[in-house]
Amino acid sequence: MTRVDAAAPAAGASGSALMERAGGAVAAEVANGWPDARRILVLAGPGNNGGDGFVAARKLAEAGREVLVALLGDRESLKGDAAVAAARWTGETGPLPNAPFEACDLVIDALFGAGLGRPIEGAAADAVSAANASGLPIVSVDVPSGLDGATGRPLGDACVRASLTVTFVRLKPGHVLTPGRSLCGRVVLADIGMPEDAVAGIGARAFLNRPALWRDQLPAPSIEGHKYSRGHVAVWSGPELSTGAARLSALAALRSGAGAVTLLGQRAALKEHAAHLTAVMLREAENDWAEFLTQRRVSAVVVGPAAGPTERTAKALTEAIEAGCHVVMDADVFSLFAGRPDDLAALIARGSGQVALTPHEGEFARVFGVDKTASKLERARAAAARSGATVLLKGADTVVATPDGRATVADNAPPYLATAGAGDVLAGLCAGLLAQGAPAFEAASAAVWLHGEAATAVGRGLIADDLPGAIPEALRRMEERAAG
């Protein structure tokens, strides 16, 4: 967005006109959302974010609200478009340290935008703390002041907790990555007339995870199809006392639309599976796993859920890669490769199928290490480039990234999805879509979105066992979006 703003004048949009529309969008959201808020306090910073605040102040005053601007620094120090916006404001302006929170009904936070690169200090930090403590609704301009727009993390101790954030042209990663999503409150994306030429030339590679991105890449069932033409998924089972995770993966793969799913493992484990499963096939696999993958036309494999970080698991994984299957690696696989990301990449390079890695944050750190300076989006992209696989980094803001830099960020996961076994379902869902012919990026992104929609369909009280049965409802919601 920094580059978009810089390209705007050459594309025919003046900064002053864009600021006027941005401030107007903020004022409109305040007017519509809080019709009874008569006294408005605008916290204005020394840059363009403050200029947006001055415009919002003027428009709200013109609409009959009582507005006070509390300015950080001297009015004479304002430059460019912000100075023009301040000059058009004829209402009351006071110093930021004297902001009368107790006399107001609502606060507009126009201190700092997404480009802030250091922690807020001094009078501005005091104002942020006072705003948060006031109990008043806070409407932030662009991003809550103190939030890093690229990472979604506060830059320091002082960060606004907004009720509503009004941003412009495109969302920033900080609006959807946690904890930024929570700090932003509800986010409104306002169209301020930025020329499309200024946006299109930037080549954005990160997207909100939505069906429009991947729906056309998911094969639809054909009336002429049969179970193997719809893809065969093999799931490697854990030992006798650890069978549940693999079973959840198998059920999810089958519910995703895969034509056949086989759970393979030791005889004692299969007895446990047989007590719970009917549509999923079972097969003992001690020495003929590789042969089975080839002879039974297995398209995709899940290895890892409760499999144990053992030589047996490592051998099954290696044989699946070398057989040319698409492979979803989850759970205990990441313990096998702890601190060995290059060995993981070397194994992946030996196969001809597509590979998806599905770690949570702890598993990701185990393999790829911890980088506290990079955003979740940046870390997932770097891991994808290093491993040569599509990386699905799980969480409330699950990121799917490819080696070429494409990425999606999910925002539809309900809080009750944080339950044991949910990740096993996600791995199976991803494998099922891979088996049907979806490319890895689209399969993984679709799996994440469907996973969230299935959880929402179940609602509070969700346990992982509920998720496979809710996948048809999630698929129905996907089809409704496509039709709409």
Image: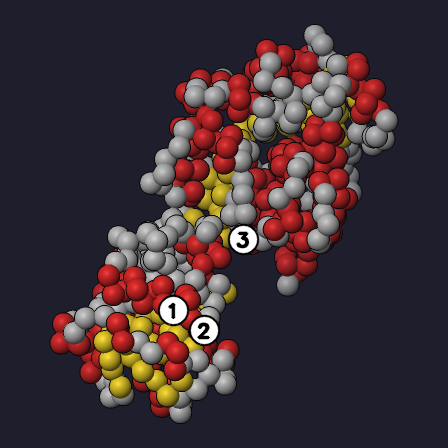
Label 3: few (<14), some (14–19) or many (≥20) C-alpha neighbours in 10 Å: many
- In the picture as drawn, the residue positioned furthest to the left comes out as 76
Disc sitting over residue 131 in the figure: 1
Identify the residue at horizontal 71%, vertical 23% (top origin).
242
Q: Amino acid at mark 2?
A: Leu
Q: CA distance from mark 3 to mark 1?
A: 27 Å
Between residue 212 and residue 426, name the one nearer to us. Answer: 426
Quadrant of res 308 = top right
Give the answer, above or below, for where 87 lies relative to 202. below
Q: Amino acid at mark 3?
A: Asp
Image location of residue 82, percent across then percent down: 22, 73
Q: Are marks 2 and 1 in contact (CB under 8 Å)?
A: yes
The mark lying in front, picked from 3 and 2, is: 2
Q: Amino acid at mark 1?
A: Ala
Disc sitting over residue 411 in the figure: 3
Give the answer, above or below, for where 178 lies relative to 11. above
Can I make out residue 331 in this image? yes
Identify the residue at horizontal 58%, vertical 18% (top origin).
309
Image location of residue 296, percent across then percent down: 73, 20
**Kind of element beneath mark 2:** loop
Name the residue carrying label 2. 136
Q: Are marks 3 and 1 in contact (CB under 8 Å)?
A: no
Quadrant of res 60 = bottom left
Q: CA distance from mark 2 to mark 1?
A: 7 Å
